[in-house]
Amino acid sequence: MNIGIMQPYFFPYLGYFQLIQAVDRFVIYDDVNFIKGGWINRNFILSKQGPQRITLQLHGASPNKLINAVEVEGNTKKLLLTISQLYGKAPYYHSVFPVIESCLLYTEKNLARFLEFSLHQLCIHLGIHTEIRVSSQIEKDNSLRGPEKVITICKQLGADVYINAIGGQELYDKTHFNKNGLNLFFLQMGKVDYPQFHNEFAPNLSIIDVLMFNSPTQISRFLQEYILV
């Protein structure tokens, strides 16, 4: 069985969902430290001037706190307005916007649970049926850090393959995982592009952008555009 483990991201890019689809079980890594300036509460969507950052306001966010100890503060209606203004004329706006709306208007204040809900909703819309677990609900030694904690989660869930995003090559060593009975692979996105109004294509934006401009059939193809290295 193969497994993927990632921090919960705010409307993450396509490759995040490729990883969820590629594995048998996906673990939302909510009991690790919040990363300031990362993807946990921000992403990029498309404006007329190019990529525009959107940020979910938080209360108590700190690198000294776990993700599941941070709260959503509440600029979600403003974010919805921005998304509506920028994508109102996109071809799939009317079918996609209610999904985005349900995610942003979710009343949960705990950041980890708020993001978990949006990931579930997006997976349903994308037709991804992978089992999703939450790290803090898995029995383990929480004093462990880095690769050792990941390896423990994999063993606890009975995995023999761990798949990580390509950026994990800087963090995880295949030999170390092999010594612990796990094969380690990294998911590398293939080339994905599509028309975005009349703009020059801007890659690696939030999944919001992919959904707004592509049919479900095309997105299903995009979800397969990767290799494991």
Image: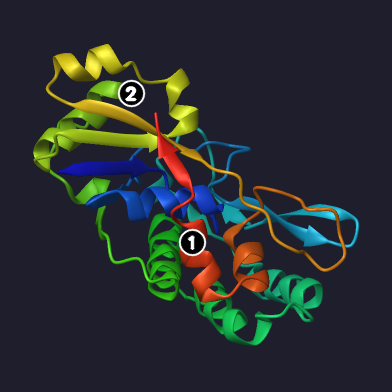
- In this rendering, is residue 135 above or below 150? below
- Report which residue position mark 2 lands on: 146
Residue 207: x %, y % from top left: 58, 60
Q: Is tag 1's residue or tag 2's residue first in the polypeptide sequence?
A: 2
User: Which numbered tag is attached to residue 128?
Assistant: none
With 23 as the anchor, is 137 left or right in this view? left
Residue 203: x %, y % from top left: 70, 48
Query: As shown in the figure, which amino acid type bears the numbered disc 1?
Result: Arg
With 28 as the anchor, is 133 left or right in this view? left
Is disc 2 placed on a helix, strand or loop? helix
- Report which residue position mark 1 lands on: 221
With 183 as the anchor, is 44 left or right in this view? right
Comparing 220 with 135, the one in front is 220
- In this view of the protein, can residue 67 be seen by the observer? yes
Comparing 47 with 81, the one in front is 47
Is disc 1 placed on a helix, strand or loop? helix
Q: Residue at x 32, y 41 (%)?
A: 5
